[in-house]
Image: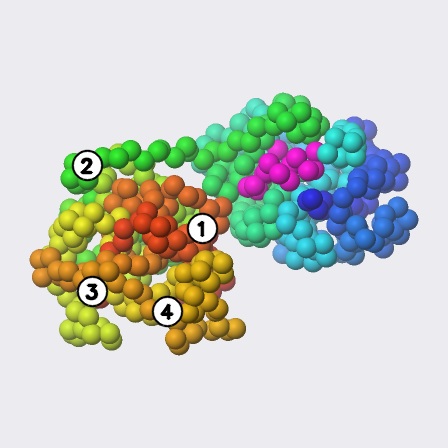
Amino acid sequence: MITLVTGLWDLGRDNLTEGWSRSYKDHYLKKLDELLKIKCNLIIFGDKELNKFVSERRQVEDTQFILRDLEWFKNNEFYSDIQKIRTNPNWYNQSGWLKESTQGSLEMYNPIVMSKMFLLNDARILDKFNSEKLYWIDAGITNTVSVGYFTNDNVLEKIDSKFNNFTFICFPYDAVNEVHGFSYDKMSEYCKTNSDMVARGGFFGGTKEMISEMNVLYYGLLKDTLSKGYMGTEESIFTIMTYIYPSLIDYVKIESNGLIYKFFEDVKNNSVKLESFRKPLKPFIQTDRKTLDTVGLYVITFNSPSQFETLIESMLDYDPSFLTKTKKYLLNNSTDLSTTKRYNQLCEQYGFEHIKKDNIGITGGRQFIAEHFNDQEDLGYYYFFEDDMFFYNGSENSCKNGFQRRVDGLFNKTLNILKKENFDFLKLNYTEFFGSHQTQWSWYNVPQEFRESHWTEKPNLPTQGYDPDAPCLEFKHIKSLGGIPYSSGEIYLSNWPILMSKEGNYKCYIKKKFNSPYEQTIMSHNYQEMVKGNINPGLLLLTPTEHNRFDFYPPELRKEC
């Protein structure tokens, strides 16, 4: 069963003008009293007085109260920006209703509603119930939603069983100038399309893993929009997130009146429909590989045009065919938007299509590239590079493991090897930064049950760190083509430079998708498929590239997915 998270504070709404006024005691506490009758685990935020109110109505076994008074909301980094915008005539004069509204006239309204995501994430961290999924629910939701949906109709059990991604409830919204005070034109810029709906803040959530990720994305958007003077409510940020993070977020449509009861009624009747802005993935169609000779080059970059430019220069020096014989794409994950101009210049200079994303992570970006390539009907193969994995142009002839560093005609020769052996993918490096293909790194990442059955002589991981006697990678054949040695066998998949076929890309990244595609997860899955004989990998017995991150960034900015 999922855990519900809520909170309630007296904001002084009793004193507002007619139409906006609601009594804390006679309205909100009564509605919370109804919500407290739900037979499920509840995490509740509030002050000492609310704690007393709750403790008189709930048992400690299914209730966790977290003390948080109004002062807490004044001590975060967003409070001053919210007040600056709220009291600015340029903001509240956008529409006649805005100045007298709750968000316009109440000092603490937006600081609280804009903290719902943060509170949900705090509940994730402090949760005493060890819940798998958490959903925020407004304390006053029974004003428009019958408590019977929860007490009699088992809607929470149905939501728990049917909803996997982070989910918002959305209603159609025909905006002209603003959306809850957020400039409509600017919201459309953030959404990267003309937004025609709003994501509600009364009920939303998902798995703990997803909440953690959403919290980071929400924080970044809230910080950026407030710093630029754009403000609506939490629903404005939720709406932007729904549009620009389709791989992570599902949504459910309700009617244009915005009343959430329609959502619970549909859940009750098993007629709820999950939607998203994800593009449907094209199924893989078996083709003759020889007829799809157009090759793609994908590079993923982050906050450093210099890293990207150095990679390009290394290709020009090592084998210009990587640039002259490919259709080129740059996936730009940068958070530092001051770099965008230089990225645009480099892409124009070297013929890359510039794809800008908002830090979807290293492996998240790798997954995006796989999906993008899957949709390109004219591409049969692609090379993948990160911006800090350059071709080696130094003076050493061999790597630390003794493998050759420079060969002529690498681009054409690797393509010929992959086609000749019908490899699904061909890794370019024997030696990597933390290790090499002597060790079978999949051993660390597969499920324990598989580890015990596949490596009977080595079934257990070390209690900490790496095992100096980890299983070795088993090679099947060692061959040579065009003067380049290569091997087949139990080659693990990782985010190092690689050449992939259309079919191999589909097998490795598309056929089975993960909500959080960590590199370890993908490595584990593909190794198990390889053992079954479903994936045919290859490895060059060379080390033509090396890792060199010379333009560093704060470690907290690094994301996997």
For disc 4, the marked residue is 471
- Depth check: give the residue in front, 458 or 535: 458
For disc 1, the marked residue is 517
- Depth check: give the residue in front, 393 or 508: 508
Marks 1 and 4 close (CB-CB < 8 Å) = no
Q: Residue furthest right?
A: 56
Specify few, some or many for label 4: CA neighbours under 10 Å numbering under 14, 14-19, or 20 or more.
Answer: some
For disc 2, the marked residue is 288
Q: Which is nearer the N-term, disc 1 or disc 3?
A: 1
Image spot of residue 120 (x, y percent): 66, 49
For disc 3, the marked residue is 541
* Foreground tag (3 vs 4): 4
Q: Which is nearer the N-term, disc 1 or disc 2?
A: 2
Q: Marks 3 and 4, how far apart in space? A: 19 Å
Range of the magenta residues? 155-169
Q: Is residue 32 left or right of residue 510?
A: right
Q: Which is nearer the N-term, disc 2 or disc 3?
A: 2
